[in-house]
Amino acid sequence: MRPPHSFASDNNAPVHPEILAAIAAANAGHVRAYGDDPWTRAMEERFREHFGPGARAFAVFGGTGANVLGFSAMLKPYEAVICAEQAHVSVDECGAPERFLGSKLLLVPTSDGKLRPDDVTARLKGLRDQHHVQPRVVSITQSTEVGTVYTPAEIGALASVAHGHGLFLHVDGARLANAAASLDVPLRALTTDAGVDVLSFGGTKNGAMAAEAVVFLRPELGEEFRFLRKQGMQLASKMRFVSAQLARLLEGDLWRANALGANRMARRLAERARGIPGVEIVHPTQANGVFARLPRPVVEPLQRQSFFYVWDEDGPVVRWMCSFDTTEADVDAFTDALAKLVRGNASPTRIG
């Protein structure tokens, strides 16, 4: 039986059949554990092809682990990360960066989830003063937590100001594939070519089972990372099964096909929802997420038909995520149900 389609998260999607096939192909015979295997070497080569010959990629199996360990290669405990207030590392990682690194997050309020150069310079206070935490990393989420996308020029401007003050630029790229597909640019255009130092590359939201990577574009930062990964509990013993997923995603641009499909369905969802009276799309639909303000009475009935998250209770603003397997039929059935519920709750006393 096929469960009903969910618009809650691209993490709710199944594993792409070609990824499952890659895992099955790796399930042959004995090879050395902990990444000393042909699949891991192939994965490392795929990352060099996409991000440049100096890129050093380390497979991990969790996005939070990827972010925290990436930070750990750049930060001392008295140093801080500048990020948007809505950043995933701030609101959705249960305080993991603060707990495991002892490092402070310097939060910037934004309306669209994106940092600007002025946001960075405004947080550069107390430099070299022993009484103040020292900013060391600028971290951006791509695509952002409200579905917006940084352009190469915007990232380059952030890299310039960060490097000009001796800071590193980090990208939480859980949905980097969706951003690159949205802008029709290669992955390196949003990272290597724009001056990014370290990134987390997300595979799980793009069709993998449990596969992320920490990628060092400033190679010297990754010199001792294998020890950090082990100590940080993100070294898989049967690494070949994680590496095989990432290698397949980056081989033949499966990553792009999956992201394009999810983005296309998000645009369709936004367009159809926008045409329903009482529904407002509150952020540009630039990747695979749609953020909408709904009449309050329709939220729970609609969630019972196809679950999704309420992003802001005050709106209420909800988030709908599309994934590689979302179909036009899924979108149309969902928006038809939304339209029916809105029509049934259309009296002025019941909307708002």
Image (spheres, rainbow, N blue to C red):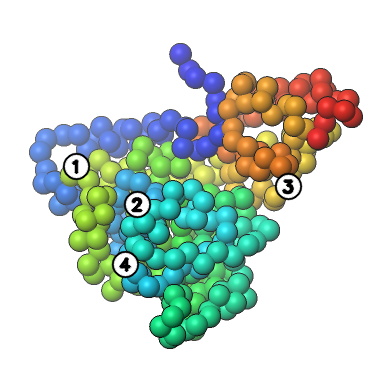
Distance Cα–Cα, label 2 vs label 1: 17 Å
Q: Earlier in the sequence, mark 4 or mark 2?
A: 2
- Dot 2 lies on which element? helix
Report the disc number at residue 282.
Answer: 3
Distance Cα–Cα, label 1 vs label 3: 43 Å
Report the amino acid beneath label 2.
Gly
- Say which quarter of the image contains residue 185: bottom right
Asked whether the viewer can see residue 277, the reply is: yes
| For residue 125, above or below residue 324 | below
Distance Cα–Cα, label 4 vs label 1: 24 Å
Q: Which residue is mark 2?
A: 65
Which residue is rendered at x = 62% and y = 21% of the image? 305
Report the amino acid beneath label 4.
Ala
Q: Which residue is mark 4?
A: 73
Q: Nearer the viewer, residue 64 or 213?
A: 64
Q: Nearer the viewer, residue 19 or 11?
A: 11
- Dot 3 lies on which element? loop
Q: Is residue 276 left or right of residue 244?
A: right
Badge 2: how crowded within 10 Å, few (<14), some, or many (20+)?
many
| For residue 279, above or below residue 111 | above
Q: Earlier in the sequence, mark 2 or mark 1?
A: 2
Nearer to us of marks 1 and 3 is 3
Report the amino acid beneath label 1.
Lys
Which quadrant does the C terminus fall into?
Answer: top right
Q: Residue 231, percent across and down?
A: 22, 56
- Dot 1 lies on which element? loop
